[in-house]
Image (spheres, rainbow, N blue to C red):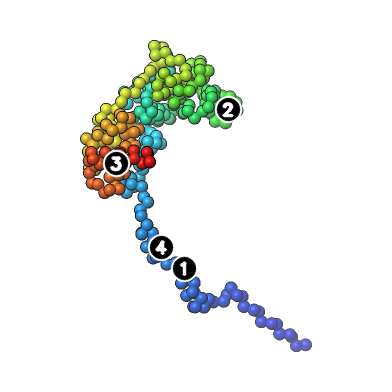
C-alpha cells in the first residue's frame, strides 16, 4: 500500500529574518545617544557648591553625624566630664543652643563606645516621663526587656533635659553607683530645668560652656576645610564676629559666604563679600 505523503511543516515565524527596511525603520525611531549627551550638557550643573569645590560632604554641616567628635575649645571640659564619670557624679552641662553640648556628648560616646555601656537619649523627643528601666534594659535588647534585666554600671546621657521629670531624676539618683555609673544632663539654662539642681551638691558637677574665642573659631573651620587660600584667618574671625559668638550660626554663615563666593567665581573672600552674602540671606528670609 502506498504511503501518504506528510504535509510539509510550516516555518516558525520567529525564525523569519527581519528585512533591512524594517531594521532601518526601527533605528530611525530610536533616539541617538549623541543627542541625549548634548541635551544633558546644555542643562545647568545641579551639583552642590561644595562638590564643585572638591569636598565630598558639606564642610560646614551642623549635623553631628558628619563631625561627631569635634569639640574645638572644649578639651578641658571633656577632661572634667571624664573625671566626673569616674567619680560616679551627676554632670550638668549648660550652654545656649548651638554652643556644642551635643558635640561633647558625641565625643563622650566615642570615648566609651567599646565598653558597650553608654545609653543616649534626647529628652525633647519624648512626651511625658522617661522610662529609665526600659533604657537600662536596652543594653540586652528584646531579651533584656522580656526578662527585665537592667544593665549595670551604665553611662546615661540625657540631651536637652529641660523637661526631665522629677520621678525620673529620683530613680536616676537611686540607681547611681549600681545600674548607673554616671549621668550627664544638658540644658540651655539650668533655670529652665523642671528638676531642682543644687550647684553645691557634692554628687553633682556643674559646667557652663564658655564662648569660643576667635582663634578657636578659626581652628574649628580650618580643621574642616584646610588651609585654602580663598579665605584668610582674619576673614574667618570676621565671619565669627557676625555670628553672635554662636558656633552653629558661625558654621551656617560660613556656608552662606562660601556658596556666594563660588556662585560668583570669587578667588578671594573679602569683608564686602561677607556682608553681601549674609545680607542676601536675611533678605531671602524676610521675603
Q: Earlier in the sequence, mark 1 or mark 3?
A: 1
Nearer the camera: disc 4 or disc 2: 4
**Gap between marks 4 and 2 measured at Cα:** 57 Å
Where disc 2 sits, the SS reads helix
- Determine whether 10 is above or below 46 in the image: below
Q: Residue at x 36, y 50 (%)?
A: 47
Q: Nearer the viewer, mark 2 or mark 3?
A: 3
Residue 276: percent from left, percent from top: 27, 41
The total of numbered circles placed on residues is 4
Q: Which residue is denoted by mark 2 in the rendering?
A: 145
Q: Is residue 11 left or right of residue 152?
A: right
Instruction: Say which mark, if any, is on residue 50.
Output: none
Crowding at mark 2 (Cα within 10 Å: few <14, some 14-19, many 20+): some
Q: Nearer the viewer, mark 1 or mark 3?
A: 3
The vertical placement of 2 against 273, above or below, is below
Seen in the picture, residue 151 relative to 250 is either above or below; the reply is above
Q: CA distance from mark 2 to mark 1?
A: 61 Å
**Disc number placed over residue 30 in the picture, else none:** 1
Q: Quadrant of residue 187?
A: top left
At x 33% / y 47%, what residue is drawn?
A: 49
Tag 4 near tag 3, CB within 8 Å? no
Residues at marks 4 and 1, CA–CA distance in whole angstroms = 11 Å
Residue 209 percent across, percent down from the top left: 34, 23
Contact (CB < 8 A) between labels 4 and 2? no
Q: Residues within 10 Å of mark 1 (few under 14, many from 20)?
A: few
Residue 36: assigned label = 4
Amino acid at each position: 500500500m502506498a504511503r501518504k505523503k506528510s504535509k510539509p511543516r510550516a516555518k516558525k515565524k520567529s525564525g523569519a529574518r527581519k528585512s533591512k527596511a524594517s531594521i532601518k525603520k526601527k533605528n530611525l525611531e530610536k533616539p541617538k545617544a549623541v543627542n541625549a549627551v548634548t541635551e544633558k550638557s546644555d542643562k545647568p550643573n545641579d551639583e552642590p557648591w561644595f562638590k564643585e569645590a572638591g569636598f565630598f560632604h558639606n564642610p560646614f554641616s551642623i549635623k553631628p553625624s558628619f563631625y561627631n567628635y569635634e569639640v574645638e575649645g572644649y578639651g578641658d571640659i571633656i577632661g572634667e566630664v571624664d573625671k566626673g564619670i569616674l567619680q560616679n557624679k551627676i554632670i550638668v552641662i549648660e550652654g545656649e543652643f548651638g554652643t556644642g553640648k551635643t558635640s561633647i556628648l558625641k565625643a563622650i560616646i566615642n570615648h566609651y563606645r567599646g565598653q558597650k555601656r553608654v545609653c543616649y537619649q534626647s529628652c525633647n523627643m519624648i512626651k511625658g516621663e522617661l522610662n529609665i528601666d526600659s533604657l537600662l534594659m536596652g543594653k540586652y535588647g528584646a531579651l533584656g526587656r522580656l526578662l527585665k534585666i537592667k544593665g549595670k554600671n551604665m553611662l546615661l546621657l540625657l540631651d536637652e533635659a529641660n523637661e526631665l521629670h522629677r520621678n525620673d531624676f529620683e530613680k536616676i539618683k537611686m540607681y547611681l553607683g549600681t545600674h548607673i555609673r554616671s549621668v550627664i544632663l544638658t540644658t540651655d539654662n539650668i533655670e529652665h530645668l523642671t528638676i531642682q539642681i543644687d550647684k553645691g551638691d557634692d554628687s553633682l558637677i556643674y559646667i557652663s560652656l564658655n564662648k569660643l574665642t576667635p582663634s578657636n573659631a578659626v581652628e574649628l573651620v580650618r580643621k574642616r576645610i584646610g588651609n585654602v587660600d580663598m579665605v584668610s584667618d582674619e576673614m574667618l574671625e570676621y565671619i565669627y564676629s557676625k555670628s553672635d559668638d554662636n558656633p552653629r550660626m558661625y558654621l551656617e554663615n560660613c556656608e552662606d559666604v562660601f556658596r556666594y563666593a563660588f556662585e560668583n567665581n570669587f578667588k578671594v573672600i573679602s569683608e564686602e563679600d561677607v556682608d553681601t552674602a549674609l545680607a542676601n540671606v536675611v533678605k531671602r528670609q524676610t521675603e
